Amino acid sequence: MNAPQKTSSRLEALRKNIQAPPKTIAVYIALYIPIGFVMNGIGQAAEIAEFANWWQVLTCYGLYLIPCSLVIRHRTYWDQYLFGVFMLGLLETLGYAFGTSIAHEGNILDQILGPRNFALAMSLWFGVYLPAGNFAVSTILKKLG
């Protein structure tokens, strides 16, 4: 298989993995978006970190985490977690680099781990979103029938 065929087959596999019935997409949206607002609120209240703008919850949770979750939803827990750490690592690092995410100075994570480990700690912690979210969506869908 030559390079263009490999790329084409990978894109086809990605397209196939991300497809889901409308009911499944609705459950992801109903679960992820409120969780995003709650987590941003907790980050603000605890003065750990927050988005620079409220609407970033919609873009990060809705347009980034949901598609990431869909792509890997049929993989093992550890595959999902590792993919989640990688994808959240990109999101966290770029968010703090561009100033679209704000880490509060002297927050509890900085005090425990040091400021140089903040984005890593956030990535390791939030990497669990993808497998946990996929498990929750699967459970909800089973209960809905």
Image (cartoon, grey):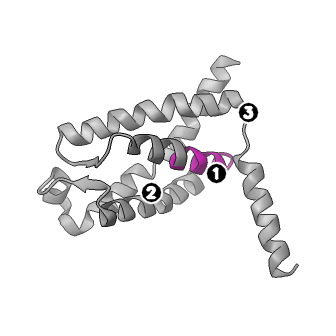
User: Magenta segment range?
Assistant: 64-76
Q: Distance between the residues labelled 1 and 3?
A: 16 Å
Which residue: 45% across, 48% down? 60
Which residue position holds label 1? 72
Q: Please give left or right for residue 132 compared with residue 94 in the image.
A: right
Residue 44 lies, in percent from the top left, at 22, 41
How packed mark 1 is, by other alpha carbons closer than 10 Å (few <14, some 14-19, many 20 or more), is many
Which residue: 56% across, 54% down? 78
How packed mark 2 is, by other alpha carbons closer than 10 Å (few <14, some 14-19, many 20 or more), is many
Which residue: 75% across, 53% down? 15
Which residue position holds label 3? 21
Q: Which of the numbered marks, if any, corresponds to residue 32?
A: none
* Tally of numbered tags: 3
Residue 83 lies, in percent from the top left, at 55, 59
Q: Which of the numbered marks, if any, corresponds to residue 88?
A: 2
Please report whichever mark, 2 or 3, sits nearer to the chain's N-terminal start: 3
* Image quarter of the N terminus: bottom right
The amino acid at mark 3 is Pro
